Amino acid sequence: MRSLRLLTFVLGIILTGLVGLRVAVGAEDARSIQAEAVEAHWKWDLEKAIRLYTRALTLDPNNARAYFNRGVAYRSKGDVDHALKDFNQAVAKNPDISESLYGRGQIYLQRKMYDKAITDMNRVIELDPKHSGAFRVRAEAALALTKPEQALEDLNEALKLYPADSESYFLRAIAYRDLKNTDMALADLTKTLELNTKQADAWLKRGNIFFAQGKTGQAIEDYNHAINLNPSHAEAFNNRGWARFVLKDLEEAVSDLTRAVELDPKFATALTNRATVYRKMQRNESALADYSRLLALRKSDASLFIGRGQVLLDLAQPAEAIKDFDAIAQTFGLGPAEN
């Protein structure tokens, strides 16, 4: 009996050692596979990298870094859903890896989950007070939540940490604009473009300020840059079209506004602007068509009924015009229009 107990004891020690050895070998294999995955990742072989990260995680399912790296690879492929799942796993396995929180917070920002983005960036800044990107992302979320003062504080900090960040200058310009500080907004947009001439939205926003200041020619130059950089920028076409209308270049204005509507068929501002230009050109049938399209988008907009009614009067269709004016009266609980 005593020899049996001794044998059991010895076998237990041996088996425990074997289990420990297997775990150690598994961890070592996982590290080796993860190193291969990182190499594939650097070579931008994302499919291979993801496959290798997955193998490493099979051997070492608590490897937060492997989850993070695989999430980055998924995000690089455009697979944001899987990236978010992996960032969540990385944070769960190790909540002190700032990169995982930052990656997740960026996705939250992209998905307009602004409070969650701010929460993650708060933690990143706790872990790494010099993380300029976290200040910038938190500021962008604050801007989306109409908190420009808060955004301004974060962007000032971001630019102290990274003075060459064109995106922080751009966002700070938006914060200044929202705070009605046009001069500072203009200065920051100009700085943005000094650092990055390919920032189409910066050209657009600066053009808008020039237009508001009555500098229509300079505005058009900036809109030209925005369109050259992004030929699918509907807002830039709309704004350039309206600027050309102000300069009485009506044919070019219609051309730009038509392109804006082609790019975004539900762009109500572009349709309204084009209807206005058509009326100025006495192309009332075209203006009528635009007002009808607008009313399909905004059925309860009284100004559109007024605009279409006026066009119908110009087209000598008073009975149809009265229907539109009656629609306004009904909307606001007034009596019917008189013949």
Image (cartoon, rainbow, N blue to C red):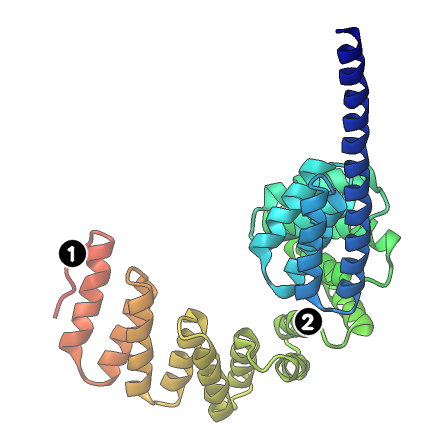
Across and down, in percent, residue 78 comes to 60, 63
Residue 282: image quadrant is bottom left
Q: Secondary structure at mark 1?
A: loop
Left/right of residue 324 with respect to residue 180 in the rendered view? left
Q: Amino acid at mark 1?
A: Gly
**Labelled disc at residue 253:** none
Identify the residue position indicated by label 1 in the image: 335
Residue at 59% over, 57% down: 80
Q: Is residue 114 above or below residue 245?
A: above
Q: Secondary structure at mark 2?
A: helix
Quarter in which the C terminus is drawn: bottom left
Across and down, in percent, residue 67 comes to 70, 48
Q: CA distance from mark 1 to mark 2?
A: 46 Å
Across and down, in percent, residue 202 comes to 69, 70
Residue 274: image quadrant is bottom left
Q: Nearer the viewer, residue 318 or 241?
A: 241
Residue density around tag 2, few if under 14, some if 14–19, many if 20 or more, within 10 Å: many
Which of disc 2 and disc 1 is earlier in sequence?
2
Q: Amino acid at mark 2?
A: Arg
Residue at 31% over, 74% down: 293
Identify the residue position indicated by label 2 in the image: 206
Residue 117: image quadrant is top right
Q: Nearer the viewer, residue 91 or 306?
A: 91
